[in-house]
Amino acid sequence: MSLLKILSRMLEHEGFEVVQAKDGKEAVDLFFESPESFDCVLLDMGMPKLNGQEAATKIKEKNSDVPIVLLRGYDECEVNTHFNDSILAGTLQKPVSRKTLIETLGSVMNKEAIIKKAASPGR
């Protein structure tokens, strides 16, 4: 079973709605079809067609508010040389445990919800 399917099942089991893409180009295309329907984007640095950096950059150009978490097989310092601080909300080292995956995504998504709530009119 592929990493994509394993992670999707883990997330769905925890109540997340998952949109799968077989490569970076498809991920960007799916995001562009309905950017408002994504609360978070999980990308792999080693995706074909568009890698994680290329896909993240395009997604952020469309919606700078969406949090992006990057799965990496690389050393974190190497990842940081490819991204500026404003693009990624977090990184996860492969292999990633269910607990770490859920905690990271939950933290990123809750933080974004708190920021949006605090910035809403009337506060």
Image: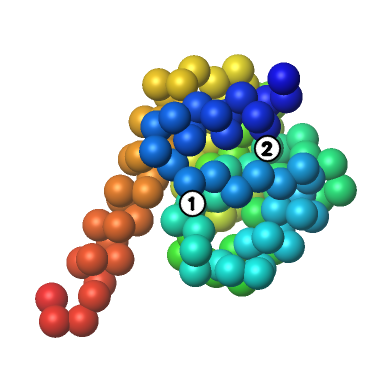
- Image quarter of residue 8: top right
Residue, disc 1: 40
Q: Is residue 53 above or below residue 2?
A: below
> Tag 2: residue type?
Asp
Location of residue 57 in the rendering, given as x and y in whole percent from the top left corner:
67, 59
Secondary structure under tag 2 reads strand
Location of residue 114 in the rendering, given as x and y in whole percent from the top left corner:
25, 57
Q: Residues within 10 Å of mark 2 (few under 14, many from 20)?
A: many
The residue at the point 65 percent across, 29 percent down is 5
Which residue extends farthest left?
123
The residue at the point 49 percent across, 40 percent down is 90
Which residue extends farthest bottom?
122
Query: In what quadrant of the picture does the C terminus appear?
Result: bottom left
Residue, disc 2: 44
> Tag 1: residue type?
Cys
Q: Does 46 sit left or right of 63 as displayed?
A: right
Q: Which one is nearer the viewer's eye here, 8 or 93? A: 8
Work out how far the residue at label 1 is from the one at label 2, CA to CA, in angstroms: 14 Å
Location of residue 56 in the rendering, given as x and y in whole percent from the top left corner:
65, 54
Q: How is the image coloured?
A: rainbow
Q: Residues within 10 Å of mark 1 (few under 14, many from 20)?
A: some
Q: Is residue 73 at least partly visible in the picture? A: yes
The residue at the point 39 percent across, 38 percent down is 15
Which residue extends farthest right?
49
The residue at the point 46 percent across, 21 percent down is 98
Q: Is residue 9 above or below residue 1?
A: below
Query: In what quadrant of the picture does the N terminus appear?
Result: top right
Q: Which one is nearer the viewer's eye here, 104 or 2? A: 2
- Image quarter of residue 119: bottom left
